[in-house]
Amino acid sequence: MPLIIKDEYPKKLFREDGKRLDGRDKHELRPIKMEVGVIKNADGSAYLEWGNNKIFAAVYGPRDVHPHHLAKSDRGILRIFYRMATYSVFERKRPAPGRREKEISMVISDCLEPVLFLELYPGTSFEVFIEVIDADGGTRCAGTTVAALALADAGIPMRSLVTSVALGKIDGEIVVDLSGIEDKAGQADLPCAITWFNDQLSLLQFDGDMTLEEMNKCLDLAPDILKRIYEMQLNALKEKYLKIREEVNKSEEIATEGGEQ
């Protein structure tokens, strides 16, 4: 269950035993579960559970651009639609996309566009719909991670996957993977993302109060944390095709047994 109750937050974000309120160490990720190919009518899709976050991503394309004046003659375009379900947060949000959702859509698009070979698809668009079913901190990072996974599942040519995570500062300590309560009651939030084909940051935002030394510590921690999540992305993709191979092998065995009879 999410730890946030309305707008009331505890004064301390570490327990007496030195653990964070959800029982994690300072550099420990929340539990993460990934799966691809979860939406049958999409060209590619993925589902992500990250702590209490639950997010779907669906990819459609390449397809015609509407309205037509947005199309580019020399390359395709990437359109990201990040949305939070009305019931995804404690207080019901309005169904219409707000300014924050539009901003996060733009941020995720800027993260993912460099890894796509959009020049191979002139005059068309790829549309990625990210739906947050349950939100508990770090949804822009989780949304970026699951969207990259859905694009890979769609078979779209990519230079690499993109992986994202939020680091930050709570009670004067640097921590990784901020939960919702840590994001709101903590001292600083530093979302970042990496494109693995060149090991470059494609997202780096900052909100809060942090010294230059503390920020450098966050950036030193980020590569190892991002690598862990990247391995989970790769495993989620591999698992789908291992299941397909098992099904094919079983079908061949059944066909062989039938022929022998």
Image: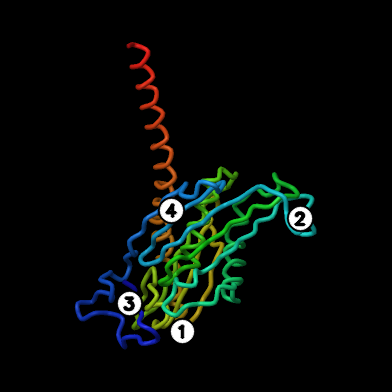
Cβ–Cβ below 8 Å for labels 1 and 2?
A: no
Residue closest to the eye, 165 or 213: 165
Q: Residues within 10 Å of mark 2 (few under 14, many from 20)?
A: some
Q: Position of residue 127 (x, y in %)?
A: 62, 55
Residue that badge 3 annotates = 3
Q: Nearer the viewer, mark 3 or mark 4?
A: 3
**Which tag, 1 or 3, sits closer to the chain's start?**
3
Residue that badge 1 annotates = 209
Q: Secondary structure at mark 4?
A: helix
Q: Nearer the viewer, mark 1 or mark 2?
A: 2
Residue closest to the eye, 213 or 95: 95
**Which tag, 2 or 3, sits closer to the chain's start?**
3
**Which tag, 1 or 4, sits closer to the chain's start?**
1
**What residue sits 39% from the left and 46% below the top?**
235
Please state which amino acid type lies under the numbered disc 4.
Tyr
**How far is the residue under mark 1 from the one under mark 2?**
42 Å
Q: Nearer the viewer, mark 1 or mark 3?
A: 3
Cβ–Cβ below 8 Å for labels 2 and 3?
A: no
Q: How many marks?
A: 4
**Which tag, 3 or 4, sits closer to the chain's start?**
3
**Which tag, 2 or 4, sits closer to the chain's start?**
2
> Which label sits on residue 71?
2
Q: Secondary structure at mark 3?
A: loop
Q: Quadrant of the C terminus?
A: top left
